[in-house]
Image (tube, rainbow, N blue to C red):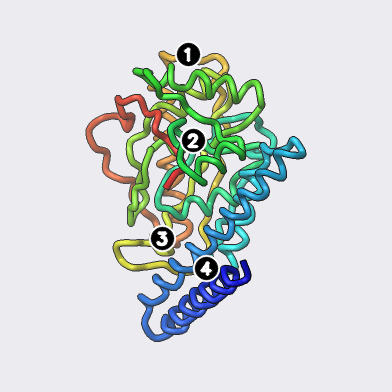
């Protein structure tokens, strides 16, 4: 056992030294900062994932496991601030995230760095929503199950409404908010834009009769832009928009709800990014369609 611990300590020390060397090198070669922060992010994720499994088990034992994802997200926020110098600053003057509960919280999805954003946005008793099939993946699935992930059952389902039924029941019975990315995948965009929205999150909110809280994150390609080998420290602004009530809506309203919410979020995304960059930006050119995918949209998940 002592031999194993020795090799773990040596490997960890080597990893840290390697990361610090790239940080030092970045003073002369900017691209080295990309590698340094990438290495720092991975070790931060591993540390917080290990903590997540441990704390989820502990919280299960004391009966308060539904704050596990909030707890782990917060730990990742502080660890990443120390190791990479990146911070998401949330503007929520009306305290919507803490006072509107339960709710379906939705946000634009840019890169893997959005996982760090959740550490700043997550209210207590909130979890991600994910496909039920992820439950079977070792370690990740265990953590998700232990920490109260709202799983969406896609078995034999032909549309988003049927797939969201069990998730809707869990939200209302356990008063658990969920966070979803309606784009369904990362955009990796250099300029403020959003991919078409899938309708799953909106079906879920309507079925559960809970509000939708839109969260907009400014485009942060100046902080992380993988194609350009850019990964810097910095502050990224986030804005929480007014909740959208769904109590009097039905399935027939979902497409309009999805389209209108996306349009509101896109306008705020451009404004927020313009403010962060200190210069006006134009709205993205409209393409064909209304910004709503015709597919079921039930794949929306935070999994990177």
| Residue at numbered disc 3 | 279
Please tell me whether mark 2 or mark 4 is closer to you in this view. 2
**Is label 2 in contact with label 4 (beta carbons under 8 Å)?**
no
Q: Is residue 225 left or right of residue 10?
A: left
What secondary structure is found at the residue carrying circle 3?
loop
Q: Which mark is residue 135?
A: 2
Front residue of 223 and 275: 223
In percent of width and height, residue 65 lies at 68, 38
Front residue of 11 and 80: 11
The residue that appears at 33% across and 29% down in the rendered structure is 292
The residue that appears at 33% across and 36% down in the rendered structure is 196
What secondary structure is found at the residue carrying circle 1?
loop
What secondary structure is found at the residue carrying circle 4?
helix
Front residue of 298 and 136: 136
Please tell me whether mark 2 or mark 3 is closer to you in this view. 2
| Residue at numbered disc 1 | 250
Per the model, the C-alpha gap separating discs 2 and 4 is 30 Å
In percent of width and height, residue 26 lies at 42, 80
What secondary structure is found at the residue carrying circle 2?
helix
| Residue at numbered disc 4 | 84
Q: Quadrant of residue 85?
A: bottom right
In percent of width and height, residue 299 lies at 39, 33
Residue sticking out furthest to the right = 62
Can residue 93 be seen in the rendering of this structure? no
């Amino acid at each position: 056992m002592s031999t194993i611990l020795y090799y773990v300590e040596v490997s960890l020390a080597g990893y840290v030294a390697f990361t610090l060397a790239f940080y030092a090198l970045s003073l002369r070669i900017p691209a080295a900062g990309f590698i340094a922060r990438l290495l720092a992010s991975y070790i931060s994720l591993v540390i917080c994932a290990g903590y997540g499994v441990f704390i989820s088990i502990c919280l299960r034992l004391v009966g308060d496991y539904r704050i596990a994802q909030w707890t782990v997200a917060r730990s990742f926020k502080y660890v990443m601030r120390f190791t990479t110098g990146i911070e998401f600053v949330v503007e929520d003057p009306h305290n919507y995230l803490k006072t509107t509960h339960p709710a379906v919280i939705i946000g634009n999805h840019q890169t893997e760095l959005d996982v760090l954003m959740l550490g700043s946005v997550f209210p207590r008793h909130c979890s991600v929503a994910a496909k039920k099939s992820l439950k079977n993946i070792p370690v990740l699935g265990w953590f998700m199950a232990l920490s109260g992930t709202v799983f969406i059952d896609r078995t034999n389902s032909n549309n988003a409404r049927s797939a969201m039924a069990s998730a809707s029941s869990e939200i209302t019975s356990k008063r658990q908010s969920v966070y979803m990315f309606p784009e369904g995948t990362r955009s990796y965009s250099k300029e403020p834009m959003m991919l078409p929205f899938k309708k799953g999150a909106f079906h879920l909110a309507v079925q559960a009769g809970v509000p939708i809280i839109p969260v907009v994150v400014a485009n942060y390609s100046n902080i992380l832009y993988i194609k350009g080998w850019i990964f810097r420290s910095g502050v990224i602004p986030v804005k929480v928009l007014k909740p959208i009530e769904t109590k009097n809506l039905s399935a027939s309203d979902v497409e309009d709800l999805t389209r209108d919410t996306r349009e509101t979020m896109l306008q705020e995304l451009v404004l927020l990014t313009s403010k962060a960059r200190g210069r006006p930006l134009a709205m993205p050119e409209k393409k064909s369609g209304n910004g709503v995918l015709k597919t079921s949209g039930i794949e929306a998940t935070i999994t990177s």
